[in-house]
Image (tube, rainbow, N blue to C red):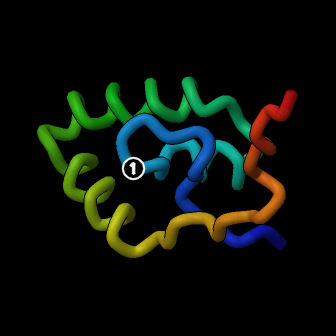
């Protein structure tokens, strides 16, 4: 079972929606749209839950393989 992390690569604000999308195997744009619609319909309750989630869910660990080597001529 995968552990939930905030995404480092698919991040717009905090990476929480990107991390949820990776964890659930869904499209991050769909998760973001659902969060926005839910925030508007819940009178801000989802925003509070989102902020708590940002505090509780850790950032994904950095991989040493994510960098691009510098270009040498």
Q: Quadrant of the N terminus?
A: bottom right
- Is 28 left, or right, of 67 in this rendering? left
- Residue 70, quarter of picture: top right
- Residue 42, quarter of picture: top left
Q: Nearer the viewer, residue 34 or 58?
A: 58
Please tell me which residue is depicted at 86% across the width and 27% down the height of the picture: 73
**What is the total number of numbered labels drawn onto the structure image?**
1
Q: Nearer the viewer, residue 42 or 56?
A: 56
| Residue that lies at the very extreme toward the left in this rendered image | 43
For mark 1, give the secondary structure. loop
Image spot of residue 26 (x, y percent): 71, 36
Say few, some or many: other residues with alpha carbon within 10 Å of mark 1 (under 14 / 14 to 19 / 20 or more). Answer: some
Residue 71 vs 14, above or below: the answer is above
Image spot of residue 48 (x, y percent): 20, 56
- Residue 27, quarter of picture: top right
Residue 30 vs 6, above or below: the answer is above
Residue 5 vs 13, above or below: the answer is below
Image spot of residue 68 (x, y percent): 77, 42
- Is 28 left, or right, of 45 in this rendering? right
Please tell me which residue is depicted at 33% across the width and 70% down the height of the picture: 55
Q: Which residue is mark 1?
A: 14
């Amino acid at each position: 079972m995968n552990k939930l992390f905030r995404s480092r690569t698919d991040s717009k604000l905090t990476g929480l929606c990107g991390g949820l999308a990776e964890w659930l195997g869904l499209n991050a744009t769909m998760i973001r749209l659902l969060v926005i619609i839910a925030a508007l319909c819940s009178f801000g309750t989802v925003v509070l839950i989102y902020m708590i989630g940002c505090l509780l869910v850790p950032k994904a660990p950095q991989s040493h393989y994510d960098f691009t080597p510098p270009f040498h001529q």
